[in-house]
Image (cartoon, rainbow, N blue to C red):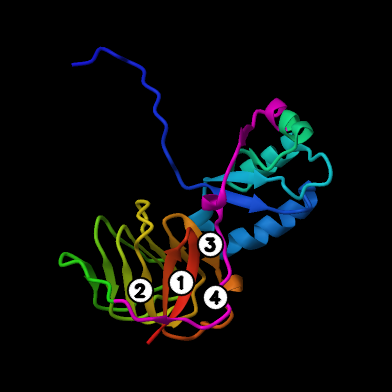
Amino acid sequence: MSDQLLELKGSLFPLTVLSCKELSVTFLQQQLSQKLAQAPAFFYQAPIILNLTDCQQLPDFDAIKQLFTELNLVLVGVCGANPELKQAAQQAGLASLQLGKDAKTTVKAPAEPAKESEITPIALDSKIIEQTVRSGQQIYAKGTDLIIKGTVGAGAEVIADGNIHIYGTLRGKAIAGASGDSSKRIFCYNLQAELISIAGNYWLSDSLQGEFWGKASCIKLQDDQLVLAELG
């Protein structure tokens, strides 16, 4: 048995990357409050990386950190920073990271409508909910798929380490691959979600209201990006 009392290991955890050209505290407070109101439980104490690629001025990192604390967010560090911004961020106690394309959290749907024709096996030990999931309810399928034989109402939340199958309208939040498995998918008969997420990659309702809104849809990760496809 090892007597080692302290061990450091590299690991990968999902981080939300915030990209914004305007980094004044007033603007961030207004915009973030609106976004957080759509899914407060999902973002509670969420670790955030601030993307400074398009930043044209020196932000007040101390004030931004204080704002994030007030909003129940955790500002971990920055990415895409030039040397001046990196130094200022480090002086404020923030980490400086180099993040690639796998750090993306929101993507666009394909320009051409896609058809989901692949068969995804359903886990034999799936958790099955026979009725509608109502506002304020949270259902979690640990280590398996989740099947909802009804609607997921606005304000409701369904979470699974595996796939999520909803044989009704999805109006609330659906989070598949919650343990980090990026191969998992979300299937629903009518997409009107407040939020969808797979393995930490998410999309809010204002970004979903396009080609597949109100349709039978499949959501999956492809090349590290969320992709919507029509169920055919």
Foreground label between 1 and 2: 1
**What percent of the width, then of the height, locates residue 102?**
51, 51
Foreground label between 4 and 2: 4
The local secondary structure at tag 1 comes to loop
Dot 1 corresponds to which residue? 172
Q: Earlier in the sequence, mark 4 or mark 2?
A: 4
Magenta-highlighted residues: 89-118
Q: Toward which corner of the image does residue 64 lie, by quadrant?
A: top right
Dot 2 corresponds to which residue? 133
Determine the residue positioned at 53% across, 62% down: 39
Check if residue 90 falls in the magenta segment.
yes
Check if residue 126 falls in the magenta segment.
no
Q: Earlier in the sequence, mark 4 or mark 1?
A: 4
The local secondary structure at tag 2 comes to loop
The local secondary structure at tag 3 comes to loop
The local secondary structure at tag 4 comes to loop
In the rendered structure, the answer to whether residue 231 lies left or right of residue 37 reads: left
Q: Is residue 171 visible?
A: no
Above or below 174: residue 187 = below
In the rendered structure, the answer to whether residue 191 lies left or right of residue 75 reads: left
Q: Earlier in the sequence, mark 3 or mark 2?
A: 3
Dot 3 corresponds to which residue? 39
Foreground label between 4 and 1: 4
